[in-house]
Amino acid sequence: QVQLVESGGGLVQTGGSLRLSCAASGRTFNSYTMGWFRQAPGKEREFVAAISRAGISTAYSDSVKGRFTNSRDNAKNTVYLQMNSLKPEDTAVYYCAARGSAYITRARDGYEYWGQGTQVTVSS
């Protein structure tokens, strides 16, 4: 089992940057594929990015590709989401998630563990 705690959210102007962190408990962090999802008010939780166990493979939604970068430091049990060129439509609660499979998936139900979320607000 793994516990996840996100941090790094906040208020930023359009065009600005934020870096989210997700710290995981446990000694087997490198056995989990990690994902990021977001949920805006009144909308369903949607896939943002994911990264494989060793950090070799990544996947991004079309809406963030080229602006967001997903990375991980297995020595620190932490995954990061660097968000650049932020837009008002990026405003949401951002969640990190973990799955025991070696394969990346964009499906919410493919992830067994979730953090509590961190709010990102982009002002216009």
Image: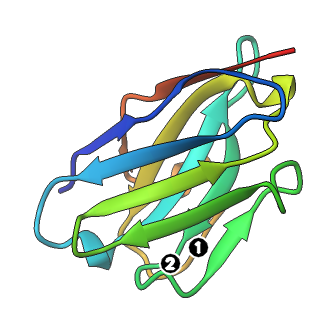
Q: Does residue 88 appear in the picture of this structure? A: yes
Image coords of residue 21 (percent x, y): 41, 47
Residue type indicated by callout 2 = Ser
Residue depth check, mark 2 versus mark 1: number of the one nearer the observer: 2
| Residue at x 56%, y 34% (from the top left corner) | 94
Q: Secondary structure at mark 2?
A: loop
| Residue at x 38%, y 35% (from the top left corner) | 7
Residue type indicated by callout 1 = Ile
Nearer to the camera, 106 or 65 = 65
- Point out the image quarter for the N terminus: bottom left
For disc 2, the marked residue is: 52
Question: Disc count in the image?
Answer: 2
The local crowd at label 2, few if under 14, some if 14 to 19, many if 20 or more residues have their Cα within 10 Å, is many
Q: Residue furthest left?
A: 27
Image coords of residue 107 (percent x, y): 64, 55
For disc 1, the marked residue is: 104
- Up-down: is 105 above or below 82? below
- Point out the image quarter for the C terminus: top right
- Up-down: is 93 above or below 18? above
Q: Secondary structure at mark 1?
A: loop
